[in-house]
Structure formats: C-alpha cells, structure tokens
Amino acid sequence: MGDRAPVHITIGGALRRDLLGDLAACAEEYDLRAEWDGEPFDPAAVTEGEPLELYGTELNGGQIPEIDAFCIEHGLIFRRWSGGCPGAYLPEIIVFDGTGPMRDYTASEDEYVLFPPSWIKGFTRLRDLKREMAKAEITVPPLVII
C-alpha cells in the first residue's frame, strides 16, 4: 500500500475551457478536495481571479504525478507541498514556474521551504542566495479559464 501523506497544490495560469474537465478527472482520481476534508473539487467552483487550491489526504507518498504532468503539459504554474512520513521521506515543496524543469525543496510539515545550512553556505553573495530563495517562494497567479 505504501506510506501515505497529505498534499496541497496551488495551480495558476491560463487553461483552455475544454481542458477543465480533464483537470477535474485527474483531481477526482486522487480524491482532491477544495479544502482539507471538504467537498470534492467541482470545476464549476473555480473562482475567477484566484489560483486553484486542491487538497488531498492519504496519498501514496504524498504524490499526484498525473496532476503534475497535466500542469507541465499545459504550462500551468504550480506549487505543490507533500507531507512527509516519519522514517520514510521528508515533506517537500515542488515548484513549476511554467517553463523548464520542476524544482524541489525540503519542506516543513506546515508548508515552509527549508534551506539546509550546507546549501546556504554554498553562496558567496547574498543577492544570489536571495534570488534562489525567491525561486522557491513563487507567487502562483490566478487560474484563468480561456
């Protein structure tokens, strides 16, 4: 069965209306909700001017690979937090800014990015460190249905 963990994903960017059903089908596959332990995701409830927030519990490894792949395929920006499982894996935050590869970071159980001292010490200039930290803390834009 595997180790189970929660997940929270924030999705933004422009999505064609005809693809909204595909996104909803992916969300249904993972039993993602509009809030923790709330109602299942209903695509009719997408709030204009806000990013889409989806929550899941008891997911294998805290992973939702089909949602990640859907977002990447359609250039949707996302930030996903996956909880950890003691003795198996740490919580993580995955960021996709709409282009390039996903970036992953160690996280806390309350969805903060954690930067290990060894990583911080690798920077010789403060502005370079701040630039890298900003990449981890992206602001996800609203999900716009076009």
Image (cartoon, rainbow, N blue to C red):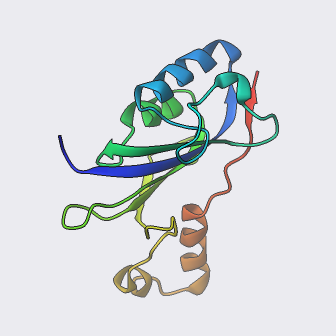
Q: Position of residue 30 (x, y in %)?
A: 41, 32
Residue 33 is left or right of residue 30, and the answer is right
Residue displayed at 54% across by 78% down: 129
Residue displayed at 43% across by 67% down: 109
Q: Residue at the top extreme?
A: 18
Residue displayed at 58% across by 85% down: 126
Question: Is residue 66 placed above or below 93 in the rendered structure?
Answer: above
Q: Position of residue 119 (x, y in %)?
A: 39, 79
Residue displayed at 44% across by 70% down: 108
Tell me the quadrant of the picture where the C terminus can be found: top right
Residue 14 is left or right of residue 80, and the answer is right
Q: Position of residue 69 (x, y in %)?
A: 43, 32
Residue 61 is left or right of residue 55, and the answer is left
Tell me the quadrant of the picture where the N terminus can be found: top left
Question: Is residue 22 placed above or below 123 in the rendered structure?
Answer: above
Question: Is residue 7 placed above or below 72 in the rendered structure?
Answer: below
Q: Position of residue 88 (x, y in %)?
A: 20, 61
Q: Camera-side residue: 79 or 63?
A: 63
